[in-house]
Amino acid sequence: MYAIIESCGKQYKVAEGDIVFFEKLDAEEGKKVTFENVVLVSNDGKVQVGNPYVKGVKVEGKVVSHGKAKKIIVFKMKAKKNYRRKQGHRQPYTKVEITSIKTASKTASTATTKKVEKTEKAEKIEA
């Protein structure tokens, strides 16, 4: 079982037990974090795609630590103008361990499949 969630303007593929590095989140170490913007859920080959998000599905995780990534160097230069600027940057991140993917209740998912089956039968009868 895996899910694709949207957080910090990016999409991440996560499964239970994964450790994911997000951009800095406002949560203390050891606290629980809930991601409700779930774009896609796959459970035993059954895929649910949201429009834009899947309703009733939540991904929960635990904040492991905060830190900074490796330093990158930003170097600007203009040829023949004696213009050189060197700047470093370290992006802050939050390390999160995914604890669970909670899907919608089974009654809601079966109700939607029954509606789809009824509409398909109605379309076949009309044709």
Image (cartoon, grey):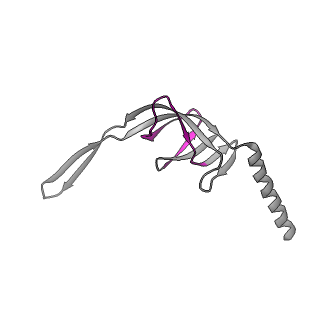
- Specify the farthest residue to the top: 30
Left or right for 42, reference 61 = right
- Locate the N terminus and report the quarter of the image it occupies: top right
Left or right for 75, reference 58 = left
Q: Is residue 13 magenta?
A: yes
Left or right for 107, reference 126 = left
**Residue 48, how many percent across, how many down?**
67, 50
Viewer-proximal residue, 80 or 90? Answer: 90
Q: Is residue 28 above or below residue 89?
A: above
Viewer-proximal residue, 79 or 121? Answer: 121
Quarter of the view holding residue 68: top left
Residue drawn at (63%, 50%) of the image: 54
Q: Is residue 47 above or below residue 119?
A: above
- Locate the C terminus and report the quarter of the image it occupies: bottom right
Residue drawn at (55%, 35%) of the image: 61
- Specify the farthest residue to the bottom: 127
**Residue 98, how many percent across, how many down?**
55, 35
Q: Which residues are magenta?
A: 10-39
- Specify the farthest residue to the right: 125
Residue drawn at (87%, 67%) of the image: 125
Left or right for 24, reference 112 = left
Residue drawn at (64%, 44%) of the image: 57
Quarter of the view holding residue 25: top left
Q: Is residue 96 above or below residue 115?
A: above
**Residue 2, how many percent across, how many down?**
61, 41
Q: How many marks?
A: 0
